[in-house]
Image (cartoon, coloured by chain):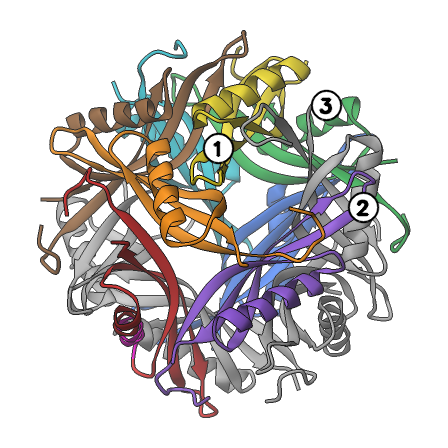
Chain colours: A cyan, C brown, D red, F purple, H orange, I blue, K yellow, L green
């Protein structure tokens, strides 16, 4: 990448889920988006939420993030 | 849906219009998005705006919302 | 366009780049989005950032914007 | 209205009240502002609040909105 | 109520649900809160969300609001 | 004032200044606004700023506030 | 208090009122909350508002604050 | 202007339009406000938006700004 | 849970602490809240902070979160 | 100071503490910053917080502020 | 720069001034910061403000920005 | 530390990077800041971002945080 050269990026908002960790949810979302969109450049976390099981355990982390990729 | 299982959601920002009500604008946007995107899961209202006619009547409600759907 | 009539808009977030000016970055993003998306109606600036060269010059302006277009 | 031509708008913040609905409060505020200000172009909802009666009923909706009109 | 006299209020965040309308969800939340808390004074809408059915209908409105009541 | 009855309020943004205190700046702004506008109902503090003298003393408090009054 | 040891805090939102000063409204809210809740640890000011009398005087300061206390 | 002396400012929200540049839209709004209001002291940009022509050109920049002037 | 059926949720703000990780602080807060409140449904992270020891180590993570539970 | 002439300012975030008042905390922070930094021009309050003693008294006000000074 | 390698950045808030344009104010601030700080990497615009002359002209643009540089 | 006693804190904004985890990026930033600044007291996470490799892996977490230390 050369700064000053012509580039356009698009940002898309996705939500990843992981029963393990916040990083797991981010990686899950990034992998999936890379698969159906384009090669991603970066991500920005927007929100961290999650579900609680009947036993009072965090059963999953839900991370809302924006992923950015270059429009070729 | 099972919590803890692998799922990814995408959020898209749309604007619905209705001359009747805020709920009408939400429903219009949701119906249209369901049609051209995927089966929607939920929506979040971002902004409520509208146009005023020359007679001082609210001629339409414009509701900006995010709709979310699961990426299969 | 007639107010009160049935319309739906979609907003997409893109980033334009220009070594010249903020307006240049906006125009670059708008041109590119018009090309790959639909005919755009309006844009909203979200963020203005940029890169600095080793000589302390602004080497490019990066403008994050939302562009809106009607869903036909 | 012609885009690109010289226009200036002013925005004023008002609060409408209705015992019926959110739309009723918006319309009340718009009607009153149209009367004492100029011909309005659009409105933007800022806040939705309300009062609760001793019987636990919503006795009124208070909608804070910005109304915009062209400065001639 | 006399302004300037000693009063303390508490605000609590609740979410009301209605399959009909935003006002219905607000009223449902207010009624329930009045029942288990104290006599409410006012409410402030924080967020408006909802669920979409498989047929693309808004199946419920979820309104997040803060309700305030005087601590006696 | 009767809740549920027809009322419209307008909010105006003003900045009061006092070399003494934040409360002094609020009271100064409120007095002046009451004089040139209408009878005020309430105020909301938006921002607290101030100037520092060459000796490192706060030489004045500047309080940005919104004042609201009923449109008769 | 030992950092690193197991502690949980709860935050509650209250509104204090004083005809004298912002500090008076904060102290009033803190005293009352300490009385009906638990021993408080800290407070955070959320909003400063107030009422204006017919003579254009600030008749009371209303301070919205969050108070935090340890859950034993 | 002497710091510490009695002054009150008012802020008004206006929108300027220019087909040329963001600075052009700011100057247009400032000129017009100076004409119908009082001698302005400063401005604060709130939002930058714009319209896109059918050819994918930015046909106008719309800048929402607050202008402040002293109440004499 | 059936969408469209009558439900009311309450949200409470708590702070969890862990010397290990952000997830640890979330789980600690959720466990404790489940114990003294009701069966929780979900959580939302509001803020992530922490304490630094004299050796420059993060000695604890403090996570401010909102937990939601159904009011039966 | 001449408007239009070349000037650069820097803003620094500091927290002042006072057991007496919010103004006291601001003045304490400003005095200290003037001492170790440069001659300050203005300040902006970011946050007002405080500590509560075991007796339910506000034992100190903590005011987070940004102070600005000219870079010579 | 290699992604994944150990790097720390610092962000500093500065205000640049130009009688010409927003870009001019950004460049002025960046040049000055590069001179007294380190080699800058990027900037983020926080706020755009300005002063108005007695003739109703924008006499200067004031751009608040954060500049980031690597801590070596 | 004694509450009520004279203390001043400064906050500085830094960005830590780690290829492992969010906690790793926080610890990296804190260690480095402790080294070149003063003994830190606490940190506050402002933003979580990251870079994605060509293989669709999160190659690094970038955590923007504010660190606070006492000015002696």
Q: Secondary structure beneath disc 3?
A: helix
Q: Which residue is mark 2?
A: F57
Q: Position of residue D62 (x, y in %)?
A: 39, 74
Q: Position of residue F7 (x, y in %)?
A: 38, 81
Q: Nearer the viewer, residue A18 or K12?
A: K12
In the image, residue C24 sits, relative to residue A63, either above or below, namely above
Residue at image coords 54%, 72%: F35
Position of L9 with respect to C62 (left or right) is: right
In which quadrant of the rendered view does residue K40 lie?
top right
In the image, residue D34 sits, relative to residue H11, either above or below, namely below
Q: Identify the magenta region.
A: D21-29
Are the residues flagged by discs 3 and 1 in contact, CB closer than 8 Å? no
| Label placed on residue C43 | none
Residue at image coords 45%, 89%: D53
Q: Secondary structure beneath disc 2?
A: loop
Do discs 3 and 2 belong to a common subunit? Answer: no
Q: Which residue is mark 1?
A: K59
Q: Which residue is mark 3?
A: L32
Chain for numbered disc 1:
K
A19 within the magenta span: no
D24 within the magenta span: yes
Badge 3 crowding class, 10 Å Cα cut-off, few under 14, some 14 to 19, many 20 or more, is: some
């Amino acid at each position: 990448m050369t700064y000053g050269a012509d580039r356009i990026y698009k940002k898309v908002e996705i939500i990843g889920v992981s029963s393990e960790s916040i990083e797991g949810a981010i990686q899950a979302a990034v992998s999936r988006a890379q698969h159906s969109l384009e090669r991603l450049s970066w991500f920005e976390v927007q929100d961290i939420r999650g579900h609680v099981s009947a036993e009072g355990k965090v059963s999953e982390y839900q991370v809302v993030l924006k992923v950015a990729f270059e429009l070729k």
